[in-house]
Image (cartoon, grey):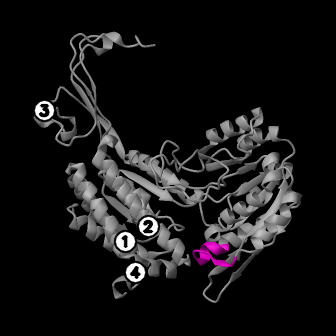
Amino acid sequence: MSNVTPIPTATELTDISRLGEAAAEAALALAAQPPAARARALAAAADALDEATVELVEVAARETGLSEVRLRGELKRTAVQLRLFSDVIIDGGYLDVRLDRDDPDFVLGPRPDLRRTLVPLGPVLNFSGSNFPFAFSVAGGDTASALAAGCSVIVKAHSGHPLLSQRTAQIVSAALEGAGAPRNTLQVIFGQAAGVEMLKNNHVRAGSFTGSIHAGRLLADMAAARPRPIPFFGELGSVNPQFVTRAKLDRDLEVVCSGYVASVAASAGQFCTKPGFLFVADASVAAGPLRAAAAGVEEHRMLNPRIAESYRDRRDTVLSVDGVTVIAQGSIRFDGDGQGWVTPTIVSVPAGLLESSGPRLLDESFGPLSVVVQYGDEAQLPALSRHLFPGNLTGGVHALEDESSPELSALINELHLSSGRVLFNGWPTGVAVTPAMQHGGPWPATTSDVGTSVGTAAIGRFLRGVSYQNVPQHLLPMQLRDDNLWSVPQSISPPGASASWGASS
């Protein structure tokens, strides 16, 4: 393991300009490659991660305290994600190629030859997340989707797993370049100051971030305040409310309670999709099964001392609110190294107290703490969701399969306005890496709710449209030429079609 020591030091600010220039050069070369070449490079990176599983999981477990089973699964997910994007760019549909042939008889006057495609933005700066040391870090979803788009990537490594970040970057960079990607396609920097300075670098054309609302908002504001503003895609905070109907609680009490506690406690509650609130008609009925489920959860280490200290303070705040009833006390202890070890804390409150308490109860608790909320009438749930939870990654409804009521329909409709993913009889932890996934939502879940950081649509964040008008064939990008040597899908509007627009209505 000598190749991952000593712990990386902060990147010198004097190096930022050089690193930015290297990323810009790599971006130009990468964008010029055919999709098949980039696809091979992504697949090679996935293979390299698979081959290094034992080494990388060992380093990750030591730095994060996460279990080997969890880390192996997450590393597999990271490799699968790279292969998914490899298939996306081989297909070529992501380029959204549209060809409008010149048309002297166009209904609004002669139309020129117009050809539109999507092109990569340029170098992307990715701020890694702490809670997913593989899937939202150096080789995670933001990196994979940016590389697939044809952008070079600079990763600001998270301070919680610097050795893992360094080694992952070495393995992935070597694999990418060995498969034909330009030198410096992927670079990594260390330290908060270096990350901020790189965000201001003129060569960087987009930013991505996974972390707290406070830090994400600061970085998003910096990106917007640049002389040349850039898009910034931040995943920030989410409490992921879950609503249980009376009929569901009556019939499936044990299933609901055990599933809820398992989701809250997974990896010490350090998921952006952890359910922070569970709405039930009778908290007293649920208290026993919830307490029993929580008692069966073993102590788990949190990611690092700073996160554990923040969780302790947040837990103290929630427990100090008058009117809060403790269902499962939970615990937090610190070992000799300052690492925090926790078991889940579950409390309950009436809906009225939740409304009046403000951020003391409504703010996200990053860790295994969640609030059971007792409501009086299902008809009030849509309004409560609208008023208390304006933006989340997920929102969930737990109801019987054959339930049908105006209140239930209104609740689901309300959740689609405030959530990126609406679940039915499922728990939000566990985000499938698949084309239809949406992992994003209205503020404060993300800084921009038009994109996703998981799923094939994630590539769209790092592309922009360009139209070519009356450009000769030999000067057009390959995907826009009539011979279509890249064999990408082309949507063609032929001459004369405009005369029949609207005829099928």
Cα separation, mark 2 vs mark 3, equals 43 Å
Q: Position of residue 320 (x, y in %)?
A: 83, 66
Q: Which residue is mark 4?
A: 55
- Kindly indicate whether the residue at mark 4 contacts the one at mark 2 (C-beta within 8 angstroms): no
Sequence-first disc among 3 and 1: 1
Q: Which structural element holds mark 2? A: helix
Q: Which residue is mark 1?
A: 50
Point out the frontmost of discs 2 and 4.
2
Sequence-first disc among 1 and 4: 1
Cα separation, mark 3 vs mark 1, equals 42 Å
- Kindly indicate whether the residue at mark 3 contacts the one at mark 4 (C-beta within 8 angstroms): no
**Residue 306 drawn in magenta:** yes
Res. 473 mark: 3
472 relative to 58 in the view: left or right: left
Q: Which residue is mark 2?
A: 76
Q: What span is colored magenta in the figure?
A: 298-309
Q: Position of residue 23 (x, y in %)?
A: 28, 59
- Comparing 133 with 364, the one in front is 133
